[in-house]
């Protein structure tokens, strides 16, 4: 007979993950565990076990709580991590999406420790976004009249279930649980429809302010109101979210994460730059981005704070179409944008820009390879939590490669 300790190889990744998790500040997770005399319940699972399970699962490309629950019954690495503890997929699912603040703090703390060690200089950062499919179908996008009709139907269904529940008090435990599950699903659908109508009003106002009368064409998903139809890498349009990573150019470590439902990268550079500066109290000297980020407003904002923007010059202006030099000053633009244009005419900056794909697109490719192709959760809050799991897992591998973790 062999124990789990004997069956798991000494150099297995699960052991390194466990050692890494033990170094993290888990106090915010322990504070959520409340002990009372009046409430009956099971013993809580130690947070380090759940963090280790999901970190290992993310590294292994496991994207759902049900699949992780199955691995916890069959795979040696997950059984070793659990020890004698048992866990169900409901607990795993809730833990994965309810601790976004802890994950963001973990990301910042680990990067800050690498900055202190001199492994992450934060002199040059690169930013890139990737569209990740949402847990919604294209057919779930509806206009306002349909949304209102569906909302009324959902409300009537919830009311009918409440009356049935009040009139039938002699159910068995199994029937009561099934009825409770049906009621919960109905309430959640009603809440999604309420949110869809709220977001419809916001989107309509935004579109009408940009193009008069366009608000009538607005559609919102009844499955995930936060999702938006976006142009994907294959040229088609699908419901998706826009995941933004900022990466240190020297260490290839992700230093900041954001998730939006904007279909373009326009307007994403300045908020990410501000996030990096305020989080680490340091202003990068250079920010590498592609031309979609280099809007006149964002370039002015970033350059005015002391960071040089390195990007290709956005094409398509009237003067450029007439054969004018794209690096020459154009009427009506800020001094910062003029300096940006002139800078990108120099060979040294053109060569620097060529390094952008190896920095900015590296974490995107790694996360894709670890199954970040479609979110299995709904809503911006939960989606960002999943993106943060991938960022923490990616940085874990970089820390191992950089020698910041003992193997």
Image: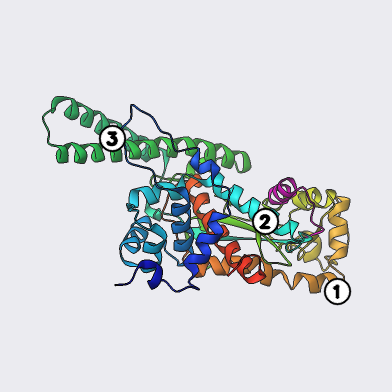
What is the x, y in percent for residue 394? 57, 64
The colouring scheme, among rainbow, by chain, secondary structure or one colour, is rainbow
How far apart, in angstroms, are the residues tagged by discs 2 and 3? Answer: 49 Å
Q: Quadrant of residue 256?
A: bottom right
Is 321 situated above or below 179? below
Q: Who comes first in sequence, dot 2 or dot 3? A: 2
Q: Residues within 10 Å of mark 1 (few under 14, many from 20)?
A: few
Q: Is residue 288 visible?
A: no
What is the x, y in percent for residue 169? 14, 27
Q: Identify the residue at image location x=39%, y=51%.
A: 92
The segment highlighted magenta reads: 271-288
Q: Quadrant of the C terminus?
A: bottom right
Q: In this rendering, would 130 be left or right of 120?
A: left
Q: Quadrant of the N terminus?
A: bottom left
What is the x, y in percent for residue 244? 61, 56
Q: Quadrant of residue 9?
A: bottom left
- Per the rendering, the mark at residue 103 is none
Q: Nearer the viewer, mark 1 or mark 2?
A: 2
Q: Which residue position is annotated with label 3?
A: 153
Please state which of residues 110 and 126 is positioned toward the viewer in this rendering.
110
Q: Which residue position is annotated with label 2?
A: 111
Please state which of residues 34 and 55 is positioned toward the viewer in this rendering.
34
Q: Nearer the viewer, mark 2 or mark 3?
A: 2
Q: In this rendering, would 6 be left or right of 15?
A: left
Q: Is residue 125 visible?
A: yes
Count of numbered badges drawn on the protein: 3
Q: Quadrant of residue 318?
A: bottom right
Helix, strand or loop at mark 2: helix
Whether 280 is among the magenta residues is: yes
Please state which of residues 301 and 295 is positioned toward the viewer in this rendering.
301
Helix, strand or loop at mark 1: helix
Is 70 situated above or below 159? below
């Amino acid at each position: 007979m062999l124990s789990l300790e004997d069956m798991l190889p000494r150099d297995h990744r699960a052991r390194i993950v466990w050692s890494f998790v033990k170094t993290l500040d888990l106090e915010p997770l322990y504070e959520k565990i409340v002990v009372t005399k009046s409430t009956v319940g099971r013993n809580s699972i130690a947070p380090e076990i759940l963090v280790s399970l999901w970190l290992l699962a993310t590294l292994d490309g496991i994207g759902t709580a049900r699949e992780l629950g199955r691995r916890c019954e069959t795979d040696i690495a997950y059984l070793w991590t659990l020890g004698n503890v048992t866990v169900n997929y409901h607990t795993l699912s809730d833990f994965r999406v309810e601790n976004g603040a802890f994950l963001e703090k973990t990301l910042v703390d680990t990067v800050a420790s690498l900055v202190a060690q001199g492994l992450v200089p934060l002199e040059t950062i690169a930013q890139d976004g990737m569209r990740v499919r949402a847990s919604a179908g294209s057919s779930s996008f509806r206009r306002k009249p349909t949304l209102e009709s569906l909302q009324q139907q959902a409300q009537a269904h919830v009311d009918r279930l409440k009356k049935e529940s009040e009139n039938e008090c002699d159910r068995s435990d199994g029937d009561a649980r099934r009825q409770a599950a049906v009621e919960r699903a109905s309430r959640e659908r009603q809440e999604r429809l309420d949110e869809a109508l709220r977001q419809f009003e916001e989107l309509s106002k935004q579109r009408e302010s940009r193009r008069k009368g366009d608000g009538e064409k607005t559609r919102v998903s009844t499955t995930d109101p936060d999702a938006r139809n976006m142009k994907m890498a294959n040229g088609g349009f699908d419901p998706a979210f826009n995941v933004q990573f900022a990466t240190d150019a020297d260490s290839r470590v992700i230093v900041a994460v954001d998730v939006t439902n904007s279909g373009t990268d326009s307007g994403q550079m300045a908020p990410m730059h501000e996030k990096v500066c305020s989080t680490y109290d340091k202003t990068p000297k250079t920010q590498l981005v592609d031309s979609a980020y280099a809007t006149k407003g964002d370039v002015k904002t970033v350059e005015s704070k002391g960071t040089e923007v390195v990007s290709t010059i956005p094409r398509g202006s009237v003067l450029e179409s007439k054969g004018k030099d794209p690096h020459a000053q154009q009427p009506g633009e800020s001094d910062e944008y003029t300096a940006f244009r002139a800078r990108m005419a120099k060979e040294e900056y053109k060569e620097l820009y060529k390094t952008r794909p190896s920095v900015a697109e590296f974490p995107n490719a790694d996360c894709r390879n670890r199954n970040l192709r479609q979110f299995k959760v709904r809503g911006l809050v939960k989606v960002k939590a999943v993106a943060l799991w991938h960022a923490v897992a990616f940085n874990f591998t970089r820390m191992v490669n950089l020698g910041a973790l003992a193997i």
